[in-house]
Image (cartoon, rainbow, N blue to C red):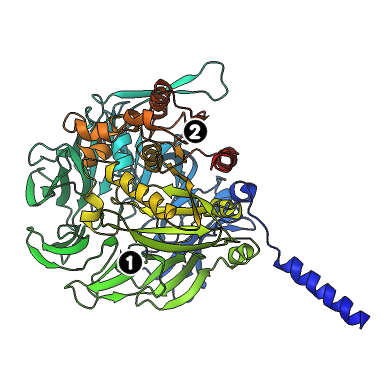
């Protein structure tokens, strides 16, 4: 009997130990990155579409290895760092590009970040047959080196000028000569890179004989300056051209350079236009497509430009009562007789098929849901592949459809967030899936949706999180007092007791077209939210009006009045929780970053009766301080819409602050300038309102590097737990 009792006690003790779970720590999140899912190196499809390559770490260094899509077996080793050393150049490969038929490989090393999307680097070309490595610009770092379609040349940018290196004879040709601090050829300026995501601003013609490129003249754009400290005795000043709302924009022109004859042609605009958000070669090297937009961004003219003369022929014009979003779905097909276009002209974002003269052939996708991105077209089977929100605004599917609009099929089989990258021949795709409780599952599929094998299942992470005391995350929805249905998610404490009352911290972004309520694994702040849930907080997020995947009416209703309807909806979210029996209605807080920081500022001012606490990280505090392209797309200029600007600025409501408020910003933020925070500090001081301020010297909009994130989130945690 004693032995049985002892055995039973040991069993109970063992089960008790097993059932005890760990709490999440900030160091595990921000220094160990313990909960970040594993990915795979970017896979590049070979020219024939039957193999993919990866940059792998091997026992002897690095290697670019090709795998067979169908079998997953190694098909070839294209390059090893041992070969580079043998050829007399030992480098660390940061990135690479494959030339035509993989005969040459373009390698980059020693890269340095410039803006959010751009960097300079040293580039070399590896010739697989000759086993030689050649620098494309001696020891100088350059931007955006790319192969020509035939693989025989490399173009790149140096000091604002466009160059071409002929790989056959080694000749270096300088295409432009006027590059300077204010003139950029083939490379974007700050505002085009940030808002139109135009980075490499030149494009090879299909026959490799011409290059179409942007020429930016920023000489009339006002200069913005900020101090850089860097532990120096005297701070240095960093200055760059930044057009704020209502100020002069860069002057942009499109040019086409013919390499064999050395001539440059100017594309002739079909009128007076402020922006050129996209250019793209058709299937013919004699025709370049160009998209021109007015400053209000409510009118877009699509033209075809003659590469020899620069003369343009309008194809069609898109008009919007609000603004036009720019997409990258344009695809020329059927020997240049037709093209695919993406538009929300019927109230939802869909794919359309036009003849080359601009006549609509058919609307390809239809329904009260949005195409979220275009994956491509297999012309041999007439099949288009795309992502959609057809299942729901919180989910993303991968679908296919015939070009005539028939045969629509959902390829993704799991409900959640599905992404896909297709092989060059569209026979295969790499899928990425996640949902609320599932970290990234990466798998290879054939084009009919059949899974061939799993590439990364993140089993180790799934096993890890089972040992932690995590709260339940679930979706909810509610209808506001204005009759609008809104989606949200919430995380409840792991020991949730419905008879108790819990404080609520809401997370908001809320900006145009961007959702935070997604059926996906949150690898960014998800575990911080779990840590707060362990401390007894309900953490939640609500997608307000203006967010995406619910059609243009829902997204664009905030036009000319940024911050108004969004703030009303976040207040409705607070009221929703205040009506729940399990929530403490006196302890609701909100926090956000960037546009979300702006929203948090709105909520602690105009929504001060509903929020006890707010945290604004890197916030816009007045739209007149932000850049022209983004701001005017939604607000027009300050002179045209003074009421919207005044109503949308938290600066004008500083005297309404009641609760606990924290401002966080980096002094080196080239996107949302530290000026926004400084001006709000002035307004709060004038209104005699208490606030907390945390600033990070030289940190940009992301506020990261070293122990920065750990320190930041330690302070955020303390602010929440001490005041909410």
Camera-side residue of 569 and 584: 584
| Quadrant location, the N terminus | bottom right
Q: What residue appears at the point 50 percent right and 19 percent down from the top-left corner?
A: 235
Please, is residue 522 above or below residue 458 in the view?
above
Q: What residue appears at the point 31 percent right and 65 percent down from the top-left corner?
A: 389
Q: Is residue 148 left or right of residue 455?
A: left
Camera-side residue of 257 and 527: 527
Q: Position of residue 663 (x, y in %)?
A: 47, 33
Are there few (<14), some (14-19), or many (20+) residues within 10 Å of tag 2?
some
Dot 2 falls on a residue whose secondary structure is: loop
Please, is residue 3 above or below residue 90 in the view?
below
Dot 1 falls on a residue whose secondary structure is: loop
Q: Position of residue 610 (x, y in %)?
A: 41, 44
Residue 616, picture quadrant:
top left
Camera-side residue of 109 and 200: 200
Q: Which mark, residue 296?
A: none
Q: Is residue 41 visible?
A: no
Q: Which residue is mark 2?
A: 699
Q: Which residue is mark 1?
A: 392
Q: Is residue 22 left or right of residue 557?
A: right
User: Which is nearer the N-term, disc 2 or disc 1?
Assistant: 1
Residue 294, picture quadrant:
top left
Front label number (2 vs 1):
1
Are there few (<14), some (14-19), or many (20+) residues within 10 Å of tag 1?
some
């Amino acid at each position: 009997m004693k032995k049985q009792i002892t055995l039973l006690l040991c069993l109970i003790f063992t089960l008790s130990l097993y059932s005890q779970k760990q709490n999440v720590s900030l160091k595990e999140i921000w220094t160990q990155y313990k909960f970040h899912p594993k990915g795979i190196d970017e896979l590049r499809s070979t020219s024939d579409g039957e193999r993919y390559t990866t940059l792998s770490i091997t026992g002897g260094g690095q290697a670019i290895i090709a795998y067979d899509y169908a079998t997953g077996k190694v098909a070839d080793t294209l390059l090893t760092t041992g070969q580079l050393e043998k050829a007399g150049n030992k480098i660390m490969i940061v990135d690479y590009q494959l030339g035509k038929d993989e005969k040459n490989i373009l390698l980059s090393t020693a890269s340095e970040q410039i803006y959010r999307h751009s960097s300079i680097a040293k580039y070399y070309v590896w010739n697989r047959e000759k086993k030689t490595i050649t620098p494309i610009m001696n020891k100088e770092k350059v931007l955006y080196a790319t192969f020509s379609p035939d693989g025989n040349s490399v173009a790149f940018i140096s000091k604002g000028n466009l160059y071409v290196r002929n790989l056959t004879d080694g000749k270096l040709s300088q295409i432009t000569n006027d590059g300077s601090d204010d003139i950029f050829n083939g490379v974007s300026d700050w505002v085009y890179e940030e808002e139109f995501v135009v980075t490499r601003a030149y494009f090879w013609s299909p026959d490799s004989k011409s290059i179409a490129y942007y020429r930016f003249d920023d000489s009339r754009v006002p200069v913005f300056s900020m101090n850089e400290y860097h532990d120096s005795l005297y701070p240095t000043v960093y200055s760059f051209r930044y057009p704020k709302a209502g100020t002069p924009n860069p002057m942009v022109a499109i040019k086409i350079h013919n390499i064999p004859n050395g001539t440059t042609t100017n594309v002739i605009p079909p009128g007076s236009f402020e922006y050129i958000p996209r250019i793209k070669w058709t299937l013919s090297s004699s025709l370049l497509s160009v998209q021109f937009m007015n400053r209000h961004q409510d009118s877009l003219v699509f033209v075809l430009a003659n590469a020899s003369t620069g003369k343009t022929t309008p194809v069609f014009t898109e008009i919007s009562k609000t603004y036009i979003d720019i997409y990258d779905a344009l695809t020329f097909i059927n020997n240049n007789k037709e093209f695919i276009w993406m538009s929300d002209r019927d109230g939802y974002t869909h794919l359309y098929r036009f003849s080359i003269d601009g006549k609509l052939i058919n609307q390809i996708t239809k329904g009260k849901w949005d195409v979220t991105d275009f994956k491509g077209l297999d012309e041999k089977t007439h099949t288009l592949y795309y992502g959609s929100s057809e299942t729901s605004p919180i989910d993303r599917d991968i679908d296919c459809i015939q070009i005539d609009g028939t045969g629509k099929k959902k390829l993704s089989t799991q409900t959640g967030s599905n992404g896909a990258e297709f092989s060059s021949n569209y026979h295969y795709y790499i899928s990425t899936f996640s949902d609320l409780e599932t970290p990234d599952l990466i798998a290879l599929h054939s084009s009919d949706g059949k899974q061939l094998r799993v590439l990364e299942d993140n089993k180790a992470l799934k096993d890890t999180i089972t040992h932690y005391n995590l709260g339940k995350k679930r979706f909810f929805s509610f209808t506001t007092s204005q009759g609008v249905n809104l989606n949200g998610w919430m995380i409840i404490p792991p020991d949730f007791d419905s008879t108790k009352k819990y404080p609520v911290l809401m997370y908001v972004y809320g900006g145009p077209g961007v959702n935070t309520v997604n059926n996906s694994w949150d690898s960014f702040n998800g575990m911080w939210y779990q840590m707060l849930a362990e401390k007894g907080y309900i953490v939640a997020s609500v997608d307000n009006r203006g967010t995406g995947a619910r059609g243009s009416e829902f997204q664009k209703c905030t036009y000319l009045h940024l911050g108004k309807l969004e703030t009303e909806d976040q207040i409705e979210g607070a009221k929703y929780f205040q009506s729940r029996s399990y929530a403490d209605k006196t302890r609701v807080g909100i926090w956000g970053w960037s546009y979300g920081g702006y929203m948090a500022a709105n909520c602690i001012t105009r929504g001060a009766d509903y929020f006890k606490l707010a945290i604004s990280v890197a916030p816009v505090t007045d739209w007149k301080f932000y850049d022209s392209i983004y701001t005017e797309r939604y607000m027009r200029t300050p002179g045209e819409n003074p009421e919207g600007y005044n109503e949308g600025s938290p600066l004008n409501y500083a005297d309404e602050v009641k609760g606990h408020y924290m401002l966080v910003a980096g002094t080196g933020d080239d996107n949302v300038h530290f000026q926004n925070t400084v001006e709000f500090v002035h307004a709060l001081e004038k209104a005699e309102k208490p606030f907390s301020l945390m600033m990070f010297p030289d940190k940009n909009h992301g506020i990261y590097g070293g122990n920065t994130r750990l320190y930041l989130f330690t302070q955020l945690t303390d602010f929440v737990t001490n005041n909410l």
